[in-house]
Image (tube, coloured by chain):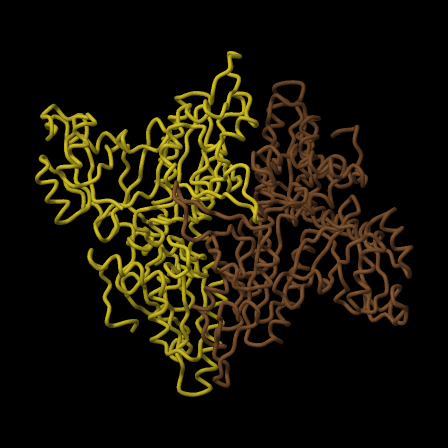
Chain colours: A brown, B yellow
Amino acid sequence: MGNPRKGLEKPSPSEFSEWFDNVIREAQVYDYGRYPVKGTGVWMPYGFSIRRRVTDLIRSILDDAGHEEVLFPMLIPEDLLVKEEEHIKGFRDEVYWVTHGGLEELDVKYALRPTSETSISFMESLWLSSYKQLPKLYYQIVSIFRYETKATRAMIRLREVTTFKEAHTAHATFEDADRQVKEAVGLYSKIFDSLGIPYTIQKRPDWDKFAGALYTIAFDTIMPDGKTLQIGTVHHLGQSFSKALDVKIQLPNEENDYVWQTSYGISDRIIASLIAIHGDKRGLKLPYSIAPIQVILVPIPGKSDEENEAVKRHVDRVMERLKQCGVRARVDWRDELTPGRKFYEWEQKGVPIRLEIGPREARENTVFMARRDTLEKRTIPLEMLCETLEQEGKSIDESLKEKAWSWMRERITRCHNLEEARESLASKRGIVEVPWCGKASCGLRMEEETEGKTLGSPIRVEEAEWARGAKCPVCGAPAVTTMRLAKSY
Amino acid sequence: MGNPRKGLEKPSPSEFSEWFDNVIREAQVYDYGRYPVKGTGVWMPYGFSIRRRVTDLIRSILDDAGHEEVLFPMLIPEDLLVKEEEHIKGFRDEVYWVTHGGLEELDVKYALRPTSETSISFMESLWLSSYKQLPKLYYQIVSIFRYETKATRAMIRLREVTTFKEAHTAHATFEDADRQVKEAVGLYSKIFDSLGIPYTIQKRPDWDKFAGALYTIAFDTIMPDGKTLQIGTVHHLGQSFSKALDVKIQLPNEENDYVWQTSYGISDRIIASLIAIHGDKRGLKLPYSIAPIQVILVPIPGKSDEENEAVKRHVDRVMERLKQCGVRARVDWRDELTPGRKFYEWEQKGVPIRLEIGPREARENTVFMARRDTLEKRTIPLEMLCETLEQEGKSIDESLKEKAWSWMRERITRCHNLEEARESLASKRGIVEVPWCGKASCGLRMEEETEGKTLGSPIRVEEAEWARGAKCPVCGAPAVTTMRLAKSY
């Protein structure tokens, strides 16, 4: 029966913020706002187990694509961080500085890494000497720090981002770095697809690219409140860091040149969006493939000791079967809670499948299954358990993904003039698309007129096709692409 | 032929320091001393893959024993860190302080965590309310920072310890915390045993316990230079942190009391000792069970294209077989290197088994196997490959472990007087044991007279049995235990 008071619908836009804060605390995912450092939170055991499965997924996809995991120091000396001019301009106001060791003042200030382009490039200047070593693909999963002056938000805008996966690659040519950007976009699509998280991909406008990059490709998703959230970025860094840090190699023609670099990052926001996008008023809804607990068994007490004994034996049999077919399952044996209370808790934690096992199931050698996403319930013979779970697991993941994509698509609106765009953003938020001539001045004007933020233009030309021939609503020139605008985090 | 210039013997005590620095850089484990922050290093891809397997091992042993992984913020506000008086006294001189965010001075100074007793206890004061929730076993694997004023050493004495596994547990009674200390000692023994790292276990004397603890149990091993290295510690914290941070629970009798706590830690030193203790003049020697690459295949070129084709096909067949039996294997196809050069590199990296595959092996459907630890070589029919590797893998691990233990045992010397002890420490280092009456003043005097550092007394009474009835060499009173002394890191 779960929690009969609450339905399976998403929180409304105005409820979202409070819903999110409650659900991550009550489902014991992330304790935010109570540890006495603003903008930081604590990954609690259940949340950590979700995080571990997400980072395992990221690792496995990057490893298979030839990336090598490394771990660099957290401190970056001031003189290293300031080497790339654009970069430090972009980060100067948000870096934390370590100035003292014990009671002594340090000779050199150290920054808590805001990102690692400078430190990784520094070591590459020692490690790389020939095009034969390239391409070289490194990544690390680490904490980064930003002294955010905007309002902080659990998992979304943090001063300590604890799950920063940053990849850094080096190449012999501009073209190869360009190819790597495309490959990274493919890998990130695969990662988000595995979690059922929908996204749009766009090239950020020049005025919003990463500090030091030639260009930036970004993944955005739409949160239940209609605001977009940047969930991944891929940067072509050109030679700006390699020149600043002197990362030189010998080319096939025996001349020396600086390497071409890319970097790409995913943060805690991947978990924030996993929770926010699939969740409903009862709490989390985790995809079966990623859930730390895929199946929760809730024993239903009988009327006699004999019945309870039979239930216990049957639960053991079911667990044995689940172990054989490699399902991550757990039994909730807690005496002090009613089955209803247990249903409520595990629904809140988003466990995809619940099996209720009482005297009847013991007698009939079955289990009674309930799906978290739809609340569909049915009885399954024990001998069909493994196949059924495999099918249901796939069906859950497909259904979550499909619903998430169709919800997001409904919130992308094409507008031919800025008035319309402004109204759409004001009333239903989401993303608006308007024809764009490509000039920065027109893009910036669109921001003003629509009170939205420019996300950039789609990297897949077919997504901008509709706008060809239309006119840029600012200058009236023929549009060459589409500009996407949104209220964004 | 590997590197015929170098043998399979350990580096001598005087060579050890240079050997260690060279081997971790040349085998591309850890780049130390070049990144421009003193006392920090970079885990390179191969080193990181070793580290990943070690942390996986630690995780699996702790998870199985009911520990839950969490992740706490890296920054600790000054007023939180200073709450436990003894604790801050112990750490005041070695804490890094963050004082600025961007260009602004912060209202409160933040410490980079030197260890997490205070922050975890703070959250426990919010999370724990009843004895029913206990025992609670948390752990995290994180970077910690100490502003070391002693000479820093790669992986051994760092300013950023990047692999700090710290467990923190809460209990309803003193006795249960005491039991947990014993359990932790058992878990740590299992972890070190799995890596073949030998150790002695002792209770540190009162003057050398963890800042804030009732008592400290430590694991020490002996490095090739004869100095001891502390590789793990387990602390009974009593109620000092729970009182300072107000971690109160309701007991079965409905009275309130502070929880009893323990904490235990393992650091990068576990990997340092894995490398140092098993290694030889050719480089690393990794146990088969932990090696990221268990088997390296080196194709031996033939005299014709046909032969090379046959070798290639045979290598593919062998890899297919290895995949089936779940062996972590890799082929070294690099054209530009001779087989001899490849042997040298993979020996240096400590890959336990090498398979050479040339025209003859292709013809005869065999592989030619060489063990890294003994250099034993023999031909194996393909159909015997999986069983043989399983046997050889076990044999390698047992042999590494046995050799390491017997080498260490030879370096533990029992002495009845301090003159003898001093000479033993001066000439052969290792550990000396002397009868001890248990008085602190006598222990401190032993340090002076022997020029050694007191490690403490064995926790297994049978290890102190020999000293019973003997006299404390300082005061002449009857000994109640043994004091262990060493030149230590």
Regarding residue A366, the answer to whether it shows in the image is: no
Q: Position of residue A420 (x, y in %)?
A: 91, 55
- Left or right: A421 as drawn, with respect to A191: right
Decide which of B187, A307 is in the foreground and name it.
B187
Q: What is the quadrant of the N terminus of chain B in the image?
A: bottom left
- Left or right: B421 as drawn, with respect to B219: left
Q: Position of residue A162 (x, y in %)?
A: 56, 46
Above or below: residue B184 compared with residue B386 = above
Above or below: residue B190 compared with residue A303 = below
Q: State the image quarter where residue A419 is shown.
A: bottom right
Above or below: residue A65 compared with residue A489 = below
Q: Position of residue A274 (x, y in %)?
A: 69, 47
Query: Residue at the location (64% across, 68% down)?
Result: A214
Q: Position of residue B469 (x, y in %)?
A: 11, 25
Regarding residue B39, the answer to whether it shows in the image is: yes
Decide which of B339, B77 is in the foreground and name it.
B77
Query: Residue at the location (41% across, 70% down)?
Result: B297
Label tally: 0
Decide which of A44, B289 is in the foreground and name it.
A44
